[in-house]
Amino acid sequence: MRNSKLATTLLLLGAAYCLLPVVWVLIAASKSSSELFSTFTLAPSTHLAGNLADLSGYRDGLYWRWMANTALYAGLGAAVSTFISAMSGYALAKFDFPGKGFVFNVILAGVLVPGVILAIPQYLLLARIGLTNTYWAVLLPSFISPYGIYLARIFAAAAVPGEILEASRIDGASDWRTFLRVVMPMMRTGLVTVFLFQFVAIWNNYMLPFIMLGNDKLYPLTVGLSSLLNQGASQPSMYTTVVTGALVSLVPLIALFFTLQRYWQVDLAAGGVKA
Amino acid sequence: MTLTATRPSTTAPPVSRKPASSRRARVPYAFLAPGLVLFTLFLAAPIVYAGYLSLRKVKVSGLGLGSKSRTEVWAGLSNYARSMTDPDWLPSVYRILGYGLVVVPVMLGLALLMALLLDAGRTRPAISGFARLSIFLPYAVPAVVASLLWGFLYLPKVSPFGYALDRFGISAPELLSSSWVLYAVANVAIWGGTGFNMIVIYTALKAVPTSLYESARIDGASELSIAWRIKIPIVMPSLIMTFVFSMIATLQVFAEPMTLKPLSNTISFTWTPLMKVYRDAFVRNDVYSAAATSVVIAVATFILSFGFLKLVGRRAFHQEES
């Protein structure tokens, strides 16, 4: 009995620690800029609508453009990356071919390469072909995810029985058709996980777009918000806009997170989703 | 895409089998092609290019005017020497070591504790479900936004703790002052990472058949000794993987201190090694030195992660080695 009270208390303390900044931003976004630093921090106010209007009005709705950019980078980037990971993972799991061990080890090493180390040479390479400061500069590098391929390989190995591939072949389906109609649906749960990983990784990415983009119309939310915060240092009235922007940026991700939470069962070591 | 059909035809003469099977042999390469092309372009090529740049430098001839006067020449290891003797380099390395010593054990310790508490099932399902989601929630918050929120909460005028301490006549510590700023940044990373690692460990615990615990309980083992003797050894591969990934993440801290920078003048432009890489490349326009530093960080990452995996007997990837 005593044990269970202690366990409950510790879990609730952990939850409170994790919710504190989220609760704070919800309250802070309702304050006017004069109240932000003068009223008790957890006392709500009535300026949320006005703050939202200010946020929308900032440079003709630049903030919403950042949000649309982020959705494009994360949505398209994660979708393409998941599809490519599925193809590669399927090939590595279900075919025997010369060089397979080498390819897999290289991809495994790629998992351990810190993505940010790549950002500067990626920038220089893309600058050389004139792609920096375009949507492609952020999209192209996010199409490839060694970790996604690694996961997809494990999902394919676990979820796609060899007999079914054989049956599909005997029925006369092409390899491409077998992949699209038989393999992809069988890997569905795993591929949702790959998609979510990559989606969150791109949505959270800061250094790559920060380096690649000079035009603030192309910014994702992370780079946009940090540039707003920088302006706040000289213009404290901007802080209210920053705080409101931070709150609004959380809404879509938290919505996605709650909708798809049952897919978040991450087994890094085995790499699998335990159904 | 050349993923053409390979119809098995029973009537076909044996002679036609040969081209069919060689076409079959190409199938896995066709599936791998897009992944490998992108891997080569955006992972392998940048690594090679960074290595190449780190060995080059610009030579200015004459007055340095005109397009022909600046040429790239072989530099040997001089960029490495210059980068490693930069007075800002060692402090940033020490800072990141201290930061890692705080973040990794605290974050993984908390993640393990929370996962064990959730798995023990001693809390009502509604409460543990709520706690699980709340603790995982920060994973969905970008590091920039997390730093921004905590950055405001660190300001004494905004912090609820500052307010409470003020009531008792105690002045709150300046969390963004030089003596606290390391912990302030570490807290953002711990806040953001605990939930994800907790889910990894919790998933590993869920995979264990409960009959294992039943028999231990019948033998009179307490929950604590079950956790210590059975559960922790079982999740060891997951702990090793989360450790390696946390270490890699520590070496590339960038977004948190960059975001907190405007709120605190104690965070310099070279606060972490990666911030120094950024400064060298884009503020000083010295991509050669930045490339050398990048290579050093990448090599350190490999040595640390492979060294650690070797040390623990590569248990983490054991399922992949068959």
Image: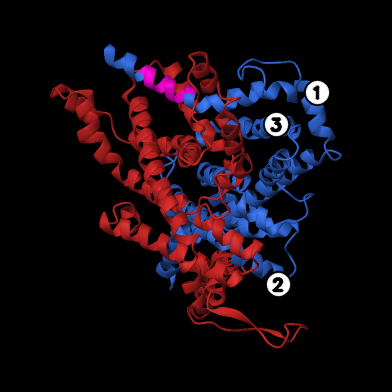
The colour applied to the residues of chain A in this rendering is blue
Q: Residue B25's spot in the image, x, y percent?
A: 50, 72
> Which chain is mark 3 on?
A
* Disc 2 to disc 1, C-alpha distance: 45 Å
**To which chain does the residue with label 2 belong?**
A
Q: Which residue is drawn at 37% across and 29% down?
A: B114
Nearer-N-terminus badge (3/2): 2
Which chain is red in the picture?
B
On the same chain, marks 2 and 1? The answer is: yes
Residue A223 is left or right of residue A165, and the answer is right
The answer to which of marks 2 and 1 sits earlier in the sequence is: 1
Name the side, left or right, on which A127 lies relative to B3. Answer: right
Residue under pointer 3: A248
Q: Where is residue B244 in the image (x, y as percent from the top left)?
A: 38, 51
Depth check, mark 2 against mark 1: the one in front is 1
Q: Nearer the viewer, residue B156 or A206?
A: B156
Alpha-carbon neighbours of circle 1 within 10 Å: few (<14), some, or many (≥20)?
Answer: some
**In this orientation, does residue A174 appear?**
no
Residue B113 screen position, x and y as percent: 34, 30
Crowdedness of circle 3 by 10 Å Cα count: few (<14), some, many (20+)? Answer: some
* Residue B26 seen anywhere in this rendered image of the structure: yes
**Label ID, residue A50:** 1
- The magenta span reads A8-16
What crowding class fits label 2: few (fewer than 14 Cα within 10 Å), some (14-19), or many (20 or more)? few
**Residue at 67 percent of width and 20 percent of height:** A38
User: On screen, B318 above or below A263?
Assistant: below
